[in-house]
Image (cartoon, grey):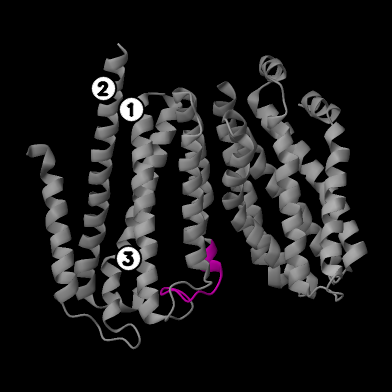
Amino acid sequence: MQKDFRLEWRQRAALSGMLLYVGSTVFVCYLSFALRGGQLPVPAWNALFWIILLFTAVNAVAKGFLQESRGRQLYYYALVQPQAVILAKIGYNALLLLVLATVAFGAYALVLGNPVQDVPLFVGTVLLGAVGFASTLTLVSGIAAKATNSHTLMAVLGFPIMIPMLLMLIKISKNALDGLEWSASRSSVLTLLALNLIVGAVSYVLFPFLWRS
Amino acid sequence: MKNNWWKVLTVVLLLYTAVAGLLLPVPRLAILNETIRNLYFHVPMWFGMTIILTASVVYSIRYLRNPSERLDTLSHGFAQTGILMGIVGLATGSLWARYTWGTWWTNDPKLNGAAIAMLIYGAYLVLRSSFADEQQRARVSAIYNIFAFAAAMPLFFILPRLTDSLHPGAGGNPAFAKYDLDSNMRLVFYPAVLGWTLLGVWITQLSVRLTLLKQYIHEKQLA
């Protein structure tokens, strides 16, 4: 499995592209709000941040399966268990999203101000979000890669499934922004963890069937 | 006739639902008034939809274990009927909301959850239509069906319970438990659930038969 992970790591050429994507998105947001001259209100700051992360995640994870050649997939198929492949992909995507989210948060806080009052909770939320996005989108991109118009399908299939997760994330990070007590967001955090577990377990069980075709 | 007793049962139950549901006395509650009768039409839709989508997932799992064209057609047919019932459920709920809340749609966790679940299943139909190869279509859509079920059910049963909602059954609104005491309503409600679910099964059976016949004719023409 470690080997598989390294194989993934080798094709990181896309990473710099994704970093640039995040940077320019944040900058576009900054410019379009700078026109109005004012500071962003806190809820809008929060929503905008998660929307940027959502689109970044879809774009980043889509590369996972869509850009792989048929030959290399056959090579993996002969070499390793499907379970190892999905776990490695989810792990790699989670790390990738984590890096992207950190960069996005840094750039975002730099240009649009940082109203977060409870930074550890906010970072924890971003971490949970990255893992959740990765486990959902990895299977979806695997499904979409089999179809003909994959790029449209990726968004159509992925977005509705991610909405519940996104709602919880926005709620928790709003709590973190306002600096509420941790107990106020505990039940949401637990639900989010449960959602992540469900999605992860379902991907783990279903992926071998997808892989075989 | 022996195998069709449940169709007779469906017709009888639905006739009973319509007649008794509209004529029998109901408790007088403020605001709700006569719209409480929507309990016999709106709520059974969601009960039936859940049962029918569960059937669809069961067929998907069976397909993955033991692929056959018939299982795929069955799973697709049940999913279609489930989506139809969901849309009717949304429509009846929306009508009801117009006369009790004064608006067709409000920003409420239950309503949004139901709408998102419909989007998820809409994506299922889009996914099915974007494959050329039949076996691959069957396999991938079975996988997505299971995935969608796992993602959509929390929307109905878990997330709305965590937050306050305007919808009856939550946040101190007159709920099922309150007029549950009125056994008159129960007498109509449970038969209604059964009747609407059986109607869904009936619709599915017809559409599956039609699809199977079309496949048969298609194969004959090819041969």
Q: Tell me the CA gap for discs 2 and 1.
A: 15 Å
The label shown at residue A34 is none
N-terminal-most mark, 3 or 1: 3
Q: Residue at x 25, y 56 (%)?
A: B196
Residues indicated by labels 3 and 2 sit on the same polypeptide chain: yes
Q: Nearer the viewer, residue B23 or A25?
A: A25
The kind of secondary structure element at disc 1 is: helix
Circle 3 residue: B42
Which image quadrant for residue A70?
top right
Specify the subunit that label 3 lies on.
Answer: B
Specify the subunit that label 2 lies on.
Answer: B
> What is the chief secondary structure element of the magenta stretch?
loop
Circle 2 residue: B217
Specify the subunit that label 1 lies on.
Answer: B
Q: Amino acid at mark 1?
A: Arg
Q: Residues within 10 Å of mark 3 (few under 14, many from 20)?
A: many
Q: Tell me the CA gap for discs 3 and 1.
A: 32 Å
The kind of secondary structure element at disc 3 is: helix
Circle 1 residue: B70
Q: Residue at x 25, y 27 (%)?
A: B213
Residues indicated by labels 2 and 1 sit on the same polypeptide chain: yes
- Residue B210 position within the rendered picture, expressed as x and y whole percent measured from the top left: 25, 34
Q: Amino acid at mark 3?
A: His
Q: Amino acid at mark 2?
A: Ile
- Counting every numbered tag in the picture gives 3
